[in-house]
Amino acid sequence: MKKFDNYRKNLDVLRLSDRQDLSNEFIISGIIDKFSIQFELGWKVLKELLTYEGINAAKTGSPREIIKQAYQYYPCIEEDVWLDMLSQRNNMAHIYDGNAAQALAQEIISRFIPAFETLEKSICERYADLLDTL
């Protein structure tokens, strides 16, 4: 599954965030940008998997609906964390304050990366046979 491969590759880079200089605005901007890409890949992977499972609601295309359906179908999804990710992703264009950007980078490191990792692990366990055939 190409989307999941991209999800994993981007996550490998995003995992390095906690080793970066979080006082550097350029680094913070890069972390936020990588988070945005990771979130997009995440909800699209969930959409693809829900479609594979025959969940009709996956056809809506709405990230919020995909997250809500995934929460009901996959025990590894923390709905509040994923909805917070969606909200942060939607609000990123309005972050002009360096302190707000730094706070978001910290939240990405402490809350969002672990959620991405949990999803990765769950997909690898649940769909190991499927991933091997693609």
Image (cartoon, rainbow, N blue to C red):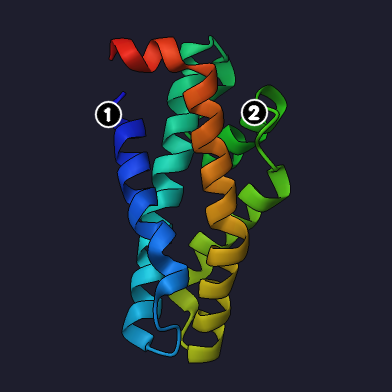
Residue 121 visible in the current orientation: yes
Q: Which residue is mark 2?
A: 69
Q: Is residue 71 above or below residue 37?
A: above
| Mark 2 nearby-residue class (10 Å; few <14, some 14–19, many ≥20) | many
Mark earlier in primary sequence (1, 2): 1
Q: Are marks 1 and 2 in contact (CB under 8 Å)?
A: no
Q: Which residue is mark 1?
A: 2
**Rendered location of residue 84, percent (x, y):** 64, 57
* Amino acid residing under circle 1: Lys
Q: Quadrant of residue 76?
A: top right
Q: Is residue 57 above or below residue 61?
A: above
Query: Residue at 31% across / 34% down in the picture?
Result: 5
SS assignment at label 1: helix
Query: Residue at 53% across / 55% down in the picture?
Result: 113
Residue 120 vs residue 100, the one in the foreground? 120
**Rendered location of residue 91, percent (x, y):** 52, 68
Q: Quadrant of residue 14?
A: bottom left
For the C terminus, the image quarter is top left
Q: Is residue 3 above or below residue 18?
A: above
Figure label count: 2
* Amino acid residing under circle 2: Gln
C-alpha span from label 1 to label 2: 22 Å
Query: Residue at 62% across / 48% down in the picture?
Result: 82
Residue 130 vs residue 19, the one in the foreground? 19
**Rendered location of residue 1, percent (x, y):** 31, 23
Q: Quadrant of residue 79?
A: top right
| Mark 1 nearby-residue class (10 Å; few <14, some 14–19, many ≥20) | few
Query: Residue at 46% across / 86% down in the picture?
Result: 96
